[in-house]
């Protein structure tokens, strides 16, 4: 909470309720785009390793990995966001996240750092029509000279679950 100077008018920023819970985020890159997710959802960051493809899986599901006895679906986040397929290599990493009871791996180009954002640092996503990638965003933050797109993991998980049911 910001303190205000005596005599200064209070400034109120009205944002949807989901922004209030944001605090520390982990930032990562896909191509030239910088994104972020809630650090509390991150379980581990692994070096990329090839996933076992599944038959009739949606295009954004790269396959599955064995993570200490747990079968982990690995998603090509670039493909799911509508930015084209990512061709993973040894320089990529997998961010293992937990959303509810589900563990998922997100293939990204690089993990950058951890940032702390206050709710007033985050702007709502502008309405740009029916863009697929915008529907997965929770907000956009300006950090230095870069814009960071904050992913809504619940929407990504819901989309992944719907894709698996349809397959």
Image (cartoon, grey):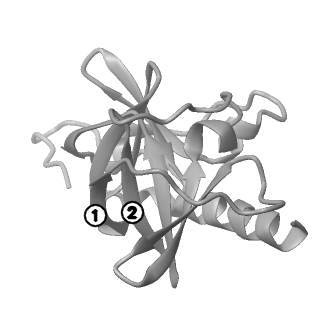
Q: Position of residue 15 (x, y in %)?
A: 51, 50
Q: Which residue is mark 1?
A: 44
The N terminus lies in quadrant = bottom left
Residue sitting at x 51%, y 63%: 17
Instruction: Say what secondary structure mark 1 lies in.
Output: strand
The C terminus lies in quadrant = bottom right
Left or right, 30 with reference to 83: left
Residue sitting at x 65%, y 32%: 85
Q: Residues within 10 Å of mark 1 (few under 14, many from 20)?
A: few
Residue sitting at x 75%, y 27%: 128
Name the foreground residue: 153 vs 46. 46
User: How many numbered marks, from 0 up?
Assistant: 2
Q: Position of residue 23 (x, y in %)?
A: 27, 57
Q: Measure the C-alpha gap from mark 2 to mark 1.
A: 5 Å
Residue sitting at x 18%, y 48%: 2
Q: Position of residue 97 (x, y in %)?
A: 41, 65
Left or right, 92 with reference to 63: left
Q: Which residue is mark 2?
A: 96
109 lies above or below 64: above
User: Which mark identifies residue 157?
Assistant: none
Name the foreground residue: 130 vs 78. 78
Q: Tags 2 and 1 in contact by the CB under 8 Å rule? A: yes
């Amino acid at each position: 909470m910001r303190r205000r100077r005596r005599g200064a008018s209070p400034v109120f920023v009205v944002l949807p309720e989901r922004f209030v819970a944001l605090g520390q985020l982990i930032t990562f890159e896909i191509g030239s785009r910088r994104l972020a997710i809630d650090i509390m959802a991150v379980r581990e960051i692994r070096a990329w390793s090839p996933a076992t493809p599944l038959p009739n899986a949606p295009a954004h599901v790269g396959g599955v990995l064995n993570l200490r006895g747990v079968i982990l679906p690995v998603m090509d986040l670039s493909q799911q966001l509508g930015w084209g397929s990512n061709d993973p290599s040894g320089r990529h990493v997998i961010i293992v996240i937990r959303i509810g009871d589900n563990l998922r791996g997100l293939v990204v180009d690089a993990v950058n750092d951890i940032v702390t954002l206050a709710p007033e640092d985050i702007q709502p996503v502008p309405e740009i029509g029916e863009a697929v990638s915008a529907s997965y965003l929770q907000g956009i933050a300006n950090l230095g000279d870069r814009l960071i797109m904050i992913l809504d993991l619940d929407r990504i998980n819901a989309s992944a679950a719907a894709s698996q049911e349809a397959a």
